Image (cartoon, rainbow, N blue to C red):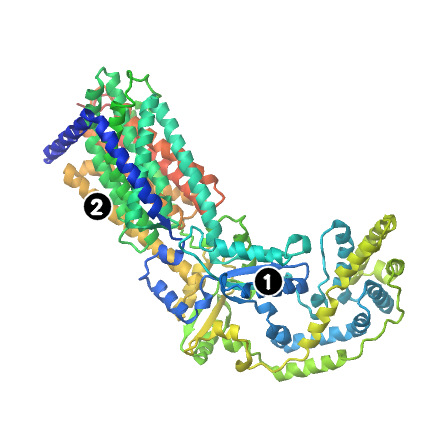
Amino acid sequence: MLSKGPVEGGADRLTRGLRRAVAAVLREPRGVVAGIAAITLLALVYAALNLGVNMDNKTSLLSQDLPSEVRARAFEKHFPLLSDALLVVVDGASNEQAREGARRLAARLASRPDLAHSVYAPEVDPFFERHALLYRKVDALETLADQLARFQPMIAELSADPHITTLAHVIEQAIDAGGKAGLADELASLLRYFGAATVAVYAERPLYVSWSEMLMGDAGPPRATIVVDPVLDFDALLPAGRAIQEIRRVAKDEGLVRETGFRVRITGYPALNDEEMRGMGMDVGFAGIFSFAMVLVLMTVALRSWRIVAAAATTLIVGLIWTAAYAAATVGKLNVVSIAFAVLFIGLGVDFAIHLGMHYVEALRDGRDHEEAMLDSVEDVGSPLLLCTLTTAIGFFSFIPTDYKGVAELGEISGVGMFIILLLTLTLFPALLTRRLRLPGPPKPGLRPWGGHGRARPRLVLGIALLVTLVAIAISPLAHFDSNVVRMRNPNTESVRTWDDLLAAGTASPWYIDILAPNLDQAEALGKELAGLDLVSQTLTLGDYVPSDQADKLDVLADLAFLLDVPPAPPSNPPELSPTGQVAALRALRGALDSDAVQHGRSRGAAAGRLLQVRLDRFLERVARDGDPQAPLHELDKSLMGGFPAELAELHLALDPDPITLENLPKPLVARMLSSDGSARLQVFPRDDLSRRGALNAFVTEVQAVVPEATGLPVNVVEFGRATSRSLIEAVAIAVGLIAALLFTLWQRPADILRALAPLVLAGAWTVGCVVLLRQSFNFVNVIALPLLVGIGVDSGIHLVGRARRGLPPEVSITDTPTARAVFYSAATTLISFGSLAFSGHRGIASLGVLLVVGMSCTLVANLVVLPALLPQGGAGRIPA
């Protein structure tokens, strides 16, 4: 038998006290049930009225005393407009259409102070529309001037008559002028758009020629971004929900829908959090329901009694209500992490009923009556249950002093919940089985999933366990913490996809670092220093919005304006505007495309011409079959030439800018780059793709080495990761130390303590090794699994070692006891029910499910295979009496 410590008498007194308490419950079951029902009703009402959700991740997840949080708040005091911004991305069929849609939407949103504190749309700001060309390099402007000079005759003719008949005619002229020299590459875009427009007419999807791309070389996606500082309601479950819904409604009212060629998408942290909360709510809710269902199924399989299952389920529900009431009274509002307490409570809380119920059923089968069976079961498992409650609570409470406030609150709620479920398991559970759900007789034997063969060859078991542990420890340095919070979210949501699009858009990337400088001069000096770093692509201050070489650029633009500032030339051969004349012009263009320059040319323009010829043939065939060709011809004319007049007007405006100075920069821009007290903002943009593993940390580390006080989204995310990793290490160290101290105080036997903790250590090492082999990573969400794994790992070891300490007959193996079966079923409940999280669309929740499955599997093997091999043996693999 395992040795008993000198304080065993204290444990015996505790056991007798628990027995007397449960005996009192059995004498007055009706009163106990009625009293608990009354308390539960009050707790339910209180929780419903007072328990809320705080979705402000900036204040609810981390300690506000962290240096990174202090710096972030200091920056926001100078630039409050940058906090919690929504990015409304307007995509159109062309650059002109996207900008026009963004212009209309921004104007509507700016008129809604109830919806947005501020609205800023730089791409459609009149200042930048007029001065856009000054931000190009001199060489690029000269190249543009040469291209526009070649297009000048076509521009002049189209400006006089902007219709497809004129366009078809000028393309004919360009083909004839090319001759043997081939078709100019500059026409390739125009010819491709022309062909695509003929297809779009009958496909009933709008398409508009991007004249800005052809005339001014505006490449890139036809997109404009509006920065909205929304009115958020943090008392609501979804703080940005109303703002996002209203933005979508306004966009629809403005006709910015797919049917008209638009797509309006919303991203930014409020939108990311909104969609994350929606997804997590569904996933966690499903996991909670599925977990509860699996509890009932597995308990039915184990105990073969619906009455015990009903009593356990009722106890679990009541405990959940009491715990929610405690959370309402102490925390008040749950955060995105602590909202998962219900799932953890179900996974851990059911263990109490399983252990007590398993021993109760075994006692009934041994011939004892109800009261004797219940009291003997309490005597067997009461003390271990109390000890497991203490150790599990320690595992949760160990997070309270850390900087990870989100898990700290989860630990407080769940830790107290363990004491609540213990109390109810020793009161409500036996009371229900005595009064309302009393068994008519002992249940049939349940499934015995675990036999005593696990200890047949203990040395082999220990040798294999040691080898696996050494391999796991060897590869554990490869495990890493992924601090990219966006990568945790569901990749199929609009906000994440849009965010990823912006990441790939150069300086439009939202992953920039912000630095607060005392004045503009110091910001510019620091920007030059940081621009030389390996991982920095560029830096940006307000001064960078004043372009260099303006005198040279203005000369080039003046010459170009003079070239284009001629009266519109009438078409050299004015075609008819009737459908007959339009069809004739298109047929003439189709015939011109038969030229050798198109058919045998190797230029991009020639290839585009051949494709246009094929599409024109199809279009003309459809027109010929239509009874009324006017409608498709009108749509083609609108697609090709609808945006030309407006774009030409913008071109003329852009060719006549004023010199840019700090004084005439637009006020919305200045407010975002220079505070009222003269403090200046410096933006630092990454060179690498920050979605790559380690790139985000490397970028932040390099910049912080020069400017430790740097802030911004990348810094906050990396510091969040560092604080989380540090908090987890602290919490695990505190938990293991306190649990070991508690066990030593109660058991006074280091060998027994080591046996109880060994499965936890082994399962921890194996879990980390499996995470590496499965190419998973730790993140802000799946770390929730750690207190659960610590609690179950320690609890199972305590139950098994505690059972061995009480002694077993020589012919009975520890793995043949109800204790071992209870350990198996309690672990299996968590394994199967929480494993459903692995199928979540939210990548963080899915990784939580994977980690729980891996960790619980390792814990189960460590406790039911390795731990029995560590226990003293007698006879043929039996523990001596």
Which amino acid, mark 1?
Leu
Residue linked to disc 2: 738
Q: Which quadrant does the C terminus fall into?
A: top left
Q: Does dot 1 land on a helix, a strand or a loop?
A: helix
Q: Which quadrant does the N terminus fall into?
A: top left
Which amino acid, mark 2?
Leu
Which image quarter: residue 866? top left
Q: Residue 813's x, y, as percent?
A: 25, 23
Task: Between residue 697 and residue 779, name the one nearer to us.
Answer: 779
Q: Residues within 10 Å of mark 1 (few under 14, many from 20)?
A: many
Q: Does dot 2 land on a helix, a strand or a loop?
A: helix
Q: Residue at x 64, y 61 (%)?
A: 221
**Location of residue 692 with respect to 38 vertically, above or below:** below
Image position of 599 (left or right of 186): right
Which image quarter: residue 98? bottom right
Q: Residue at x 42, y 66 (%)?
A: 702
Q: Residues within 10 Å of mark 2 (few under 14, many from 20)?
A: some
Q: Residue at x 64, y 75 (%)?
A: 130
Residue linked to disc 1: 105
Q: Earlier in the sequence, mark 1 or mark 2?
A: 1
For the residues marked 1 and 2, what is the alpha-carbon distance in whole angstroms? 59 Å
